[in-house]
Amino acid sequence: MTVEQQKKTTETNFELVYEGGKAEQHKIDADVLGQSLLAFSELIREANELLNGSSSEISIEVTAQKEGSFETWFSIAQIGGSLNVAEVLGIAGGSVFSGGLVAVLQKLKGRKVHDVVIDERSQNLVIDGEVIESSEEVNTLLHSNTVRKGLSHIFHSPVSREVTAKLYTENKAEQVLEVGFEQINYFRNQQVAIKEDSIETVKKYIRIAAINFATPKSGWKMILPDDVEAVAVKIDDEAFWKKVQTSSTRFSIDDLFYVELAIKTTDNGLTERKSYTITKVIAHSPADGKDKMV
């Protein structure tokens, strides 16, 4: 990711509406409504951290609330990050992520996340013989307890036989979601047990496929031995990072690096996810065959 991409600001505006209420009084419990608004902020921040890490900053503002109703307008300003958080959540309208997380939850219809099988090649979900189109980004949020708890506060707790939740894009141009009493269990809070394995440290030859001159913590990719697909990696070798910053070391995708690699495995009960950190670059073997100690 370039510095220009990191600094790019994306703004998403949408409206959350609770229609109905107790009889003709049009009332909703103040605590429930307050938790709902707070939950929106928390889940968006958590989603941004999961999807973009430290490469993106995000702010959420309540821009207005219509008097005499439960219509709240939100504005999300996202600075940097390669993924649009609102699109992955599915609250931006016209999401490129197959409708985003809310669409996947609607298709799951409250079925337990533990019963879902993920097709590792397509990242689609398989449950009860049904294939639900998804993506790695959406699945990351699906397995986040914080995100699912936030959605429960927004679309489960406030909704009743009398109250319906609706989500619109800016100026009600598009209705993204409607949750009535029949759909509230789609958004109930399902806590997924998360187990983190101990970190394994190994030494391997790798190729660096993508670099980021702005930060060592995001935008870097490497190719592991016997693999063809690049995976994300963080750099935690200060000496190597300084050489990259000062352009005192040059390399191509064909160069080999012998590195000390920390591999962290996270098991959410459904799939194992691995994250990688290069803790030390031991040697650099350029494609021209001249080995270098780093």
Image (cartoon, rainbow, N blue to C red):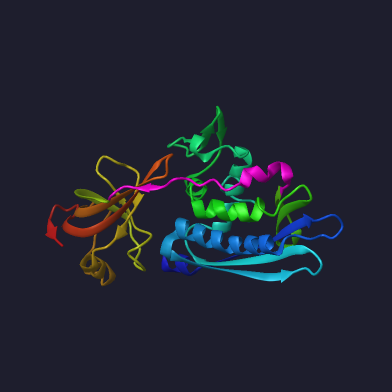
Residue 264 inside the magenta-drawn segment: no
Q: Residue at horizontal 27%, vertical 46%?
A: 224
Seen at 25% across and 70% down, the residue is 242
- Left or right for 205, reference 153: left
Residue 113 position within the rendered picture, expressed as x and y whole percent measured from the top left: 52, 40
Viewer-proximal residue among 97 and 190: 190
Measured from the top left, where is residue 212 in percent x and y?
35, 63
Residue at the image position 71 percent from the left and 48 percent from the top: 179
Residue 79 visible in this rendered orientation of the protein = yes
* Image quarter of the N terminus: bottom left
Q: How many marks?
A: 0
The region drawn magenta spans: 179-198
Classify residue 17 as left or right of residue 106. Answer: right
Q: Is residue 161 above or below residue 282?
A: above
Q: Looking at the image, can residue 93 be seen?
A: no
Residue in the foreground of this view, choosing between 84 and 66: 66
Left-right relation of 293 to 59 = left
The location of residue 284, given as percent across then percent down, is 17, 57
Q: Residue at x 26, y 67 (%)?
A: 241
Q: Residue furthest top?
A: 129
As rendered, which of 96 and 266 lies closer to the eye?
266
Q: Which quadrant is home to the C terminus? A: bottom left
Answer with the quarter of the image where residue 170 lies: bottom right
Residue 105 is situated, as x and y percent measured from the top left of the image, at 60, 43
